[in-house]
Image (cartoon, grey):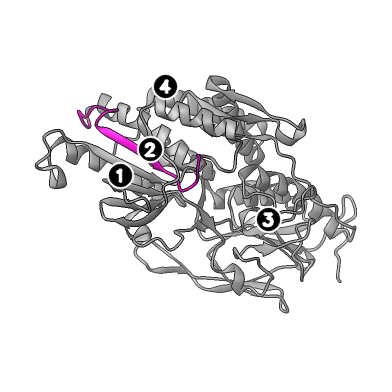
């Protein structure tokens, strides 16, 4: 196997640069390629390339705030081209559609503008080392009508679509238009399918949004009694991936916000304005959000790499694929065995963050032909946002062998710090501080909710 040894301070010519291609500009992929560009690309030691189907990046845990209108998408997006220019890597826009391991290249689909006109052709991108970090997509579990009548929150376009539909639904109800024409007391019913972090966080954020929309005069509905929010969870409790203490504390706080929580209710069908469950319930809904689960992208089993039943790429504890040591995979698209239990590490944001940091060090060792260490996930706990001023979760996790329940403003500050850590990984400490100040000022001088 060919290795490209890079002595300290050494530099390769452009024709011989070892090319590392990272496919997927999510939180982990963008943090990794930024570190590679800053530390190696700018010094001429490697050529780092990022491939993503979208031209911009948004930290995915913020999507529920975009959907609720409490976060300005344009103020928080990162443009890949600009990030590449500032941090010493190259950006190629397009979706991954093929892999040729013999030729060591990937095939990227053509890109089109908003009118469907081709702006970038289908092309092959060569690599010496390939890193797959293309995340996950929404799983509808074969529920009839789910994909047609529910809105997922997997992309910024979907989040923006929901926000516009929310404002329109409130205005139609207020003015007795359409389905609300004969309502004596118009109401807006929002059904959220799935009691995981996305569903829980969205429900709390929507309660605040309803209040702000009324304050600005977009509707005169009672923001609690007339904007009714229901979470529908198939399992026996919310937040199945977290501890029962966190789930119970979260449920209590949601009910205090007059959010209806239905557990052990399996959705069997979704119609245009109704959700049907296995217990026989038929719940009216003006807006339906699908936040019930994720699956691996369909392209992964087509790449010729071993995958599990869920379609995730099987990797060793070094994050190398089982059949090709020059191909790495991490994040939601990969199944990595835990060093403690042997079971796959969970598809969580902190896992991708830790794997990105691990891979930066591992790739330097890989370039030098040195043996790679094994990835060890350290659970630092989990936090769930419950609106502008509150959060709930557990801290420390496996670091101490126990957990500590936190909630309220302290938990909210800790939750906000997670995003600031991501910003710091992308831009450095100084710009992170400046970015924090700018967004604080924007909140003081602009409406708390996007109103159009």
State the CA–CA distance, disc 4 to disc 3: 39 Å
Give 122 or 65, whichever is nearer the viewer.
65
Badge 3 is on which residue? 330
Q: Marks 1 and 4: which is nearer the front? A: 1
Residue found at the very far left of the displayed protein: 182
Q: Residue at x 50, y 52 (%)?
A: 293
The label on residue 68 is 2
Nearest to the observer: residue 323 or residue 408: 408
- Local packing at callout 2 (Cα closer than 10 Å; few below 14, some 14-19, many 20+) is many
* 4 vs 3, front mark: 3
Sequence order check, earlier mark of 1 and 4: 1
The answer to which of marks 4 and 3 sits earlier in the sequence is: 3
Name the side, left or right, on which 296 lies relative to 366: left
Q: Circle 4 is placed at which residue position?
A: 444
Kindly identify which residue carries mark 1.
Answer: 164
Query: Few, some or many C-alpha atoms within 10 Å of disc 1 (few <14, some 14-19, many ≥20)?
Result: some
Name the residue at 70% across, 48% down.
356
Packing grade of label 3 (10 A; few <14, some 14-19, many >=20) is many
Majority secondary structure of magenta residues: loop
């Amino acid at each position: 196997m060919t290795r490209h040894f890079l002595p300290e301070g050494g530099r390769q010519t452009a024709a011989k640069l070892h090319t590392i291609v990272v496919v997927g500009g999510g939180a982990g992929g963008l943090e990794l390629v930024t570190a590679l560009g800053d530390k190696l690309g700018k010094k001429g030691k490697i050529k780092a390339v990022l491939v993503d189907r979208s031209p911009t990046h948004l930290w995915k845990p913020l999507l529920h705030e975009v959907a609720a209108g409490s976060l300005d998408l344009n103020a928080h997006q990162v443009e890949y081209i600009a990030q590449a220019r500032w941090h010493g890597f190259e950006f190629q826009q397009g979706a991954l559609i093929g892999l040729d391991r013999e030729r060591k290249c990937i095939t990227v689909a053509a890109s089109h503008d908003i009118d469907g006109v081709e702006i970038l052709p289908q092309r092959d991108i060569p690599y010496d080392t390939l890193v797959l970090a293309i995340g996950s997509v929404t799983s509808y579990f074969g529920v009839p009508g789910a994909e047609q009548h529910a809105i997922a929150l997997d992309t910024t376009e979907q989040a923006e679509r929901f926000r516009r539909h929310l404002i329109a639904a409130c205005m139609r109800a207020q003015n007795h238009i359409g389905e609300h024409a004969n309502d004596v007391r118009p109401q807006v019913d929002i059904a959220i399918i799935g009691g995981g972090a996305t569903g829980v966080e969205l429900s709390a954020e929507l309660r605040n949004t309803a209040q702000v929309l009324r304050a600005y005069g977009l509707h005169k509905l009672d923001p609690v009694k007339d904007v009714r929010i229901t979470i529908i969870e198939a399992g026996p409790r919310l937040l199945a991936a977290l501890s029962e203490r966190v789930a119970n504390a979260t449920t209590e706080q949601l009910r205090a916000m007059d959010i209806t929580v239905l557990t052990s209710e399996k959705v069997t069908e979704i119609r245009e304005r109704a959700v049907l469950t296995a217990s026989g319930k038929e719940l009216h809904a003006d807006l339906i959000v699908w936040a019930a689960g994720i699956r691996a992208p369909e392209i992964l089993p087509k790449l010729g790499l071993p995958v599990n039943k869920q379609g995730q790429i099987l990797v060793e504890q070094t994050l190398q694929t089982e059949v090709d040591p020059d191909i790495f995979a991490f994040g939601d698209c990969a199944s990595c065995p835990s060093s403690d239990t042997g079971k796959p590490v969970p598809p969580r944001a902190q896992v991708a963050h830790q794997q990105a940091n691990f891979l930066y060090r591992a790739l330097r060792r890989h370039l030098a032909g040195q043996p790679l260490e094994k990835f060890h996930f350290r659970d630092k706990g989990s936090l769930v946002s419950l609106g502008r001023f509150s959060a709930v979760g557990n801290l420390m996790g496996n670091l101490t062998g126990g957990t500590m329940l936190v909630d309220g403003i302290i938990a909210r500050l800790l939750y906000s710090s997670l995003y600031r850590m991501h910003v710091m990984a992308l831009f450095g400490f100084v710009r992170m501080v400046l970015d924090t100040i700018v967004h604080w000022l924007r909140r003081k001088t602009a409406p708390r909710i996007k109103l159009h």
